[in-house]
Every structure is written in C-alpha cells, then in structure tokens.
Amino acid sequence: MALDWDATADVVVVGYGGAGAAAALAARESGADVLAIDRYLGGGATNLSGGIVYAGGGTRIQRAAGIDDDAENMFSYLRLEVGEAVSEETLRRFCEQSPAMIDWLMGHGVPFDPSLCPFKTSYPTDDYYLYFSGSENSGGFRDAATPRPRGHRAHGPGVSGKKLYGPLAASAAAHGVRVRTGTRVTGLVVESGRVVGVEAVTIEDAPSAVRRRFAVLTRISAKPGVYHQGLRATMQRLLARVERRHGRPVRIRARSGVVLSTGGFIANGAMVREHAPGYPWSEGLPLGTAGDDGSGITLGRSVGGATDRMDSLSNWRFIAPPSAYLGALAVDADGRRMVDESRYGAALGASIAQAPGHRAWLLVDAELAARAREQMRGQTVWFQRLQLERLLRIGSVSAPTVEEAARRAGIDPAGLRRTVDAHNDAIAEGRPDPLGKPDDLRRPALRAPFTLLDISFSDRMTYPMPMLTLGGLVVDEKTGAVRTAAGEPVGGLFAAGRTAVGICSNSYVSGLSLADCIFSGRRAGTHAAVAASGARDGSPQAP
C-alpha cells in the first residue's frame, strides 16, 4: 500500500544543532535536496555552548599564532583521551582532517581568531580565542605529546556558541537547506527493511500568535532554563500543551537517508538512571536543551540500531581560573588526594562523582590564596568570577592548622594531615608527584591559614556541576550509518553528534564534542548524499 507523504527530500536531518547543520550543509554541498527538522527552534546544545572547537595539526589559526603542530602530535595526545571509543584509523583521520575542518567552518562564516591565551583556564576572557582546552600540559600527557593549544573559540564576546551555530545555519539557508522548526519526530518509516522517512507532529501551520508563543517558551526553556530545572520543566509543560492543541501529524519522505542528530540524553533523568545507576544526576546541571532527552537514540533503537557507552557521562569541576589553584590539592572526605589537579576539569569531575558522598574540597594555603586573588580579575570572565565569589564566601572554611580546617569541613583530620605531609615531603626531597602532576605546577602547602574550598558534586545554581552524556547509537566509522548489534548497517539511517558514539565518547575535553559534531555531521551528510545521488540516477543506493 502506497503511503501518503506531506513533504519529500533526498536527505532528512532530524535535530538541527551543530551536528545537524554540518550534516545538512555537507549533504547540500554534495547535491542533495535537504530538509532539516527541529523539535524547537534549532541550535540545540551548540547554541548554548562556549563555541569551542578542538582542532590542531597545524590549523591556519595555530599558524597565525606561531604555534607549530602536526597531526601526529595531535593524535599522540588524543589517543590517551579517546582510548578505544573509536578506531585508531578514525582518530587519525579526525586529526589529519582537522586543519581542513577549520577551513570549512571559516568558509561558512564561522569566525576564529589567533589571539593566544597566556594562562591555563577553563574558558578564556574576551581577549583570547586560542587556548589549551584539555590536559595537554598535565602529567603523562606532556610526556606523550608536545603540548599545543587546540581550543579554537568562535570569535565573539561572552559565551560564543551562537557565533558557531549562527553562521552555519545562515550558510545552510543560503545554500538551499530547507528547515522546519516546531516539528517533533515521533517515528521512523520503514519499507523493506530500509528507513524511507519520518513521522512527526508539527505546529508549522498554527496561527502566528501561537508560533510566537512557542518561540518565547522555547527560548526561556533553553536559557535561563538550563540553569533552573524547575523553570525548564514549567516551560516544557506549556510547550507540550501548545503541541497538543495545535500540532498536526505529518509524514516526510527521505528518498535516500535520514540523519539523526538530536543530541544526547542528559535531560532525561530516568534514562540516565537506567544506564548509569548511582550517578548523582539530580545534583548536577544537565548541559544542553530539553531536546537532549534521548529521543534520537530511541528512534534508532526502534529500527534495530545498537547502542554503546551509554554509561559514559562527563561532568566538570574546574578549579582554574585562577591558574594558581592548579597548585592546590583536591581531596575527598577521607583526606586523600583524588587526581592530578592540573588535568582538565572532567577528570576531577569524574573523581568527585566516584568519591564517598560525591564530596570533595580544594586545599589552599595562604601563599597560594594570595596569588589566586591577584589573578582573579585578569583571568576570569563574569560567570567565573560569580562562581569564585560564591565559593570563597559560602563554600570555604579556614583555620590556622590543617587539622582544624579539616574538622571544620567534615574531613578526616588525620587523613588530610598525612596527605599534606606526603605532598610536602615529596616536593622537598625532589620525588615525583604520585598522581603525576608536573613539577612546575606543584606547590607545598606550608603557610597558615589553610583554606578548604567545597568543590563537591551538589545542586548549586551559582556553582553548578555541568554534565552531558557521551554514549549513543553505534555507527559505521567511515559513513556514519547506524549499525545493528550484528554490525550490519540499518539501511537509510545515519547518526551524528551526541546521538552517536564518537570521538569524545570515552573522555571529554573542551571543544572535543563540538569538533566531533562537525566531523561526524559532515560524514553522515556526505554519505547520505551519496545515497541520494544513487536514488536520483537509478543506481543502487549506498547503505
């Protein structure tokens, strides 16, 4: 029985954030007719992000900043972070194509700048747009690869995600990509074992006043809703009411391929608990939009797609800026050190998530505290200053001795004393740090008063613990086609970004997820377009 279709395209992209825009552009550049669908207004987590793209191997931005980097050096570092999340071949391809990826982004209007940040930070001030965004300078990593800055921040004041997504969306529109917003995909249409389209509910034909209200509610849900889950939940209830009253079902045909790029599932607490029981999801800040609810992953599963690394989550506790805090000691409730404190914030965050009670503190002596205060104004942007002020005013205890500070914080005094003595003795005797912190970043804790800053995993709006999921649908690493548990491709179905397993599915550093969104989005869009070409000329379609 022939199906009735409300719209048709060669390639249908479901979810129009960074990965979706990259997929749509790549498919369009290859000659496919592309329709992108988004449940809300487009932009996704990319639009809310810091706009950092992890890139190296000698990008034009690195060269302009006088940075000498190559693909092999980049690979040597990332192999330690990426692990077995993707094959060595795929990671090498990612590194080798990295300079061209920056060229491609800039060709579509994304602005980058070679101003190099001179200090270690979680996010640079508006004076700097190229920085060390991972653990390149930390122990073990600097031994394996020459440290090079690879965090390419889209150029623009404040949080720069809009400066990445906006130009991509504008370029896609200029290239003829059609976009339907306010359209939620509810199912995949399968014929003879192949995905041939999607079923959805859309408010596209609702009265203009309704669509304006939908847009306002969506923007509030995204931000400030990302910082206040109660507010977001209220907005989502109102949005669901709009869809119930004004939505109509539609069926959209994809002549050759559907690309799923709806994000991860960090907004879905039940799904997180299913795959990562014991993870303190309710105490963190789900990073992204309400659309990061696992819907794309669920769609892929519904037609036989396999998933992997669904228990892989990343949460970040940044202690720099100020960079002086890299010399502090991060300890748990037993007073034990947790990690090389110079590592990227996701490493410390992971240790806190696994610590007793998810509690942790940063021990700072008087000398380190004074240096940190001197650095605060010059090294921080407004939200970092807000978090630091909150930490120093509310989340800290000080005392003339290590033991008394421990008692006031609720830490085992004897355990903390042993940790501090072992740390100081190792420095005095010239022994290496047991957790690998480089010697030039180590500082003895000697001068009173001693301060313990509470960096625990807890629900605090002004000092949040951002979280995101890293697992998803298993894809063919050469094409982006969704694969079954048996390793076979699901015909006509592709996935990209955090909907799929990718480069950052083992370990996250700033910019690696967005870089993977562009890398995997272009891969999926390009191969969907190859299938589209076959559909138009009558030749067999690629899987």
Image (cartoon, rainbow, N blue to C red):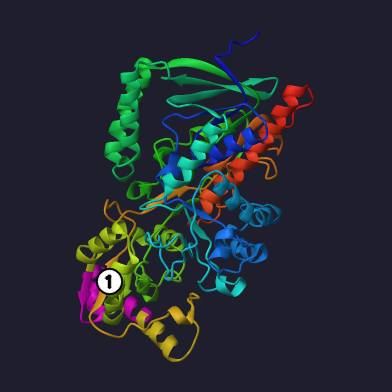
Position of 171 with respect to 159 (left or right) is right
Q: Nearer the viewer, residue 196 or 38?
A: 38
Q: Nearer the viewer, residue 478 or 99?
A: 99
Q: Secondary structure under badge 1? A: strand
Position of 412 with respect to 473 (left or right) is left
Residue kind at label 1, given as amino acid type? Leu
Q: Is residue 285 magenta?
A: no
Question: How many numbered marks appear?
Answer: 1
In percent of width and height, residue 324 lies at 36, 74
Q: Residues within 10 Å of mark 1 (few under 14, many from 20)?
A: many
Q: Is residue 407 magenta?
A: yes
Q: In the figure, 193 relative to 338: above or below?
A: above
Give me the residue at 47% from left, 82% from top: 439
Is residue 356 visible in this depiction of the protein?
yes
Q: Quadrant of the N terminus?
A: top right
In percent of width and height, residue 257 lies at 64, 28
Q: Quadrant of the C terminus?
A: top right
Q: Residue furthest right?
A: 539
Is residue 265 visible in this depiction of the protein?
no
Give me the residue at 45% from left, 44% from top: 46
Q: In the figure, 263 relative to 335: above or below?
A: above
Magenta-colored segment: predominant secondary structure? helix
Q: In the figure, 354 relative to 147: above or below?
A: above
Q: Nearer the viewer, residue 500 or 147?
A: 147
> Hey, which quadrant is residue 532 in on the image?
top right
Residue under numbered circle 1: 452
In percent of width and height, residue 442 lies at 42, 80
> Hey, which quadrant is residue 378 in on the image?
bottom left
Tell me the magenta residue range: 397-419
Q: Nearer the viewer, residue 191 or 168?
A: 168
Q: Residue furthest bottom?
A: 429
In percent of width and height, residue 515 lies at 55, 50
